[in-house]
Amino acid sequence: MPTYDYRCQKCGHVWEARLNQGDTPPQSCPRCGSKELQRLFPAPHVAKSGSRPGGRTCCGREERCTTPPCTTGGGCRKS
């Protein structure tokens, strides 16, 4: 069941409403009774494609190896 956030324009009260498809959205604020409501929209989630978090390589070096993955002995193959 989708959850929607609403804010009352009069008193500022924010609440969640769980609505199935076809349900009538809230018509008044549960706190003050005002009919001046605003549906809030969540901020979009943006992920960078192909990015890796910073840190170390699998062998512990800070810089990237030229021919990963590291050898079985734990060392990087640097050229």
Image (spheres, rainbow, N blue to C red):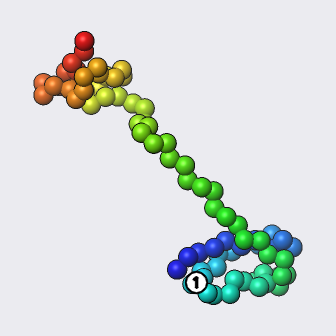
Place of residue 65 in the rendered image (x, y in percent of width and height, measured from the top left)? 29, 21
Q: Which residue is the extreme one toward the top?
A: 79
For the point 60% across and 55% down, which residue is it? 44
x, y percent for residue 60: 29, 26
User: Which residue ends up furthest to the bottom in the rendered image?
Assistant: 23
Which sits in the foreground, 79 or 58? 79
Query: 73 left or right of 66?
Result: left
30 up-or-down from 77: above or below: below
* Percent position of residue 57, x then y: 31, 28
The answer to which of 50 and 1 lies nearer the viewer is: 50
Would residue 31 be found to the left or right of residue 67 on screen?
Answer: right
Q: Compared to 48, does 15 lie above or below?
A: below
Quadrant of res 35: bottom right
As drawn, the residue found furthest toward the left would be 72
Q: In terms of secondary structure, where does tag 1 sit?
A: loop
Q: Which residue is mark 1?
A: 21
Q: Residue 75, how many percent across, how many down?
A: 19, 21
Q: Note whether 10 is above or below 72 in the view shown.
A: below
User: Is disc 1 surrounded by few (<14), some (14 to 19) or many (20+) residues within 10 Å?
Assistant: few
Give the image quarter of residue 58: top left
Residue under the image location 84 percent in, 71 percent down = 9
Q: Residue at x 79, y 84 (%)?
A: 28
Q: Left of 48 or right of it: where is 4?
A: right
Q: Please tell me which residue is depicted at 35% across the width and 28% down the height of the picture.
A: 56
User: Given the image, on which type of amino acid does mark 1 rest?
Assistant: Gln
User: Taking the image as drawn, is residue 31 in sight?
Assistant: no
Q: Is residue 58 visible?
A: yes
